[in-house]
Image: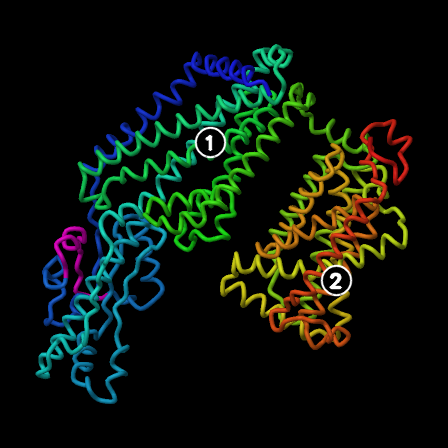
Amino acid sequence: MNWSNVKLIFVREVRDQLRDRRTLFTIAVLPLLLYPLLGVTFLQVSQFTHEQPARVWVVGAGQLPEQPPLLDQQRFHASVCGPDESRLLELQVDADLPADVDTADFTARARELIRSGTYAAVLVFPPGFATALDQYRAATGHATHTRFAQASQPRVVFDAASDRSRITDARIRAVLTDWQRAIVSQYLTDRNLLPCITDPFAVRVVDVSQESSRRAAFWSKVLPFVLFVWALTGAFYPAVDLCAGEKERGTLETLLSSPAERCEIVLGKLLTIMGFSSATSLLNLLSLAITGTAVIRLQPAMFPIGAPPISSLGWLLLALLPISALFSALALAIAAFARSTKEGQYYLMPLLLISLPLMILPMLPAVHLNLGSSLIPITGMMLLLRAVVEGQYAEAALFTPPVLLVTGGCCLVAIRWAVGQFNNESVLFRESERVHLGLWLRHLIRDRGPTPTFGQALACGLLLLTIRFFATFAAKAPTGWHDFAQLQFMTLAVLVALPVLIMTFTLTRSPRATLLLHPTSGSTLLMASLLAITLHPLAMWVAEGVQHLYPLNERMQGQIQDVQQIIASAPSIWHILALMALTPAICEELAFRGFILSGLRQQGHKWRAIVISSLLFGATHGILQQSISAALVGLVIGYVAVQSGSLLPSILFHLMYNTLGISTALGGRAWWLAWLPVDEPTTVWQWPVIVVGTLLSVAILVWFHRLPRTAAPPTKLGDALCPPSAHAPVL
């Protein structure tokens, strides 16, 4: 790599970006103006913002006892109501009760008065309320006192859909609670008992945290989120201008015809985007910190948390470089696909939809820094920043290597993707096109290829995920084996296999080539079966490790146990194997190693097709732990399908793997597997079996690797008319 070319491209791109007034405004001017303007607006609004009084209709005030007092003319009595409630609750007191107070007509009338804004709530004291209290007082301490406790209850009518009415209801109930305590205190005093008898002890809360630690705990969640959001947005818009903008200006062809290599061009553009992303994040962070400190000092009562610690800014600066590199590489790869700046701006939303959940996850109280969370991109980095800002240096040092390893790996993958985009002429020089729905559908049906395209395969995978998602919420929980079997079969056959078969016969000309329905040798089938058996101990051990990294919550564990009990009630083991081994092996393999894998291989990237199809296969399992395990096993199944050129070994592998897993999980029901060296009750294979099985699996995979490699599905008309042989080598 010629670094002088990289430097020249970097200087050129920076100079062009600095000449753009919109870029300068977004990076430099906007952060300096945005947060001060927000702070000034907040201070101005806070000066006149106050709670408005709410009107309350009190019905049946004549039913109240004289002591202890609840009302003082048109206000609640000061003994049971604080100054704020007294000011914010305006009462209209009616001593008499309407004749229809206990009917639905009165409730309907009260509802209309509340919805019209006449009152925020209605407080009703029923007939004989004072008499019931006297009877309760006289009977207190006797066995018959409980019948008076619920004899007469006041009620509050409010509208939960109205914030004003809901807040008024809370204030009224607080006043009634204080009045209730006053009544109890009076009863105890009349019987020569101390009122404190109802409070045998008081809870003393001791907060051992320091002000600095509380401040750090708050800002450790806010500042990293702001940093990451601006690093993403600050990288995307320069990337769109450096790629799609150059396409519109016609300068990209000149740059590509220069002596600089494509990787040097990508690196120069990447460094430019990283610089602007870092500058945008840094300026926004500093502006937010300065503005927040000023607002907190002017309004300390509204923000008792205090200003952000200075040390946190230093830690954020250390994380700025890898985060900017990751977002810059992703933005560059996505922007290279855009044909215009307008189209490129639309691509920001999918990137945000993927990144925002990973940014929000660390802000949840139940998410902490551990080995499992440190392996999640973006989330691990935010949790690491949260730990160092809070002063948990030992914990942060422990998980820094996996966080940096995952972040660095994602950066390398993103950079390689960006380089691949720039090496693909069909991506760089895509022409703008107008989409006519009718013509597009006609073209889709009339000009079918022998196998699906990359986009059709990806759309099929996303469609299956969407269908499974809504079906999960629509389906009712099974109550027995019959319901479970019906639900399982309908899910696999109707929601997985049927859409795939429809798309196969609709969008392709060769269902056999699409679904890899090619014959294969008996040795290949035998080796696929042996691979499933030898790989199962290692897969079970990995699954247990995944369960340890990402443990299931109690609710999910309860649901799984319920399903296991339903499965155990099956008529026989053969019913279980037919439903949970054979049916998934056929339906899922037709989808993921058939239609989807064939389409993904259209671009000739074998491993990319295998990885994407495996990720889609894992995502359909719903539960995170099962999704990870299924995706890892899916890599092996996809490799077997590609190397053998047939779907039959994959189906047989899937069948044997599920059969072995179900048999070991059932324990004593699988009588022919009672001799297996399995550690109960976790069904984890013993270490000698895991080691031997792993070595045999490697040997079998080497055997598959030495098979004559099959060519990717034909993409040209000539290839479709004269297809290569099943075992033709790829050139």
Number of the label disc, if any, that sits on residue 324: 1
On the image, the x and y values in percent for residue 407 come to 51, 39
Looking at the rendered structure, the secondary structure element under dot 2 is helix
Q: Residues within 10 Å of mark 2 (few under 14, many from 20)?
A: many
Residue sitting nearer the eye, 432 or 125: 432
Q: Is residue 306 left or right of residue 282?
A: left
Residue sitting nearer the eye, 98 or 367: 367
Q: Is residue 675 left or right of residue 683?
A: right
Q: Quadrant of the C terminus?
A: top right
Residue shown at 79% from the left, 45% from the top? 705
Q: Is residue 726 magenta?
A: no
Asked if residue 113 is positioned above or below residue 196 in the image, the reply reads above
Number of the label disc, if any, that sits on residue 581: 2
Q: Is residue 464 left or right of residue 286?
A: right
Disc 2 marks a residue whose amino acid type is Ala
For discs 1 and 2, the disc positioned in front in the rendered view: 1
On the image, the x and y values in percent for residue 702 come to 78, 48
* Cβ–Cβ under 8 Å for marks 1 and 2: no
- Toward which corner of the image does residue 33 lie, by quadrant? top left
On the image, the x and y values in percent for residue 296 come to 21, 38
Residue shown at 69% from the left, 71% from the top? 677
Q: Is residue 87 magenta?
A: yes
Q: Quadrant of the N terminus?
A: top right
Distance Cα–Cα, label 1 vs label 2: 46 Å
Looking at the rendered structure, the secondary structure element under dot 1 is helix
Residue stretch rendered in magenta on the structure: 81-97
Residue sitting nearer the eye, 350 or 93: 350
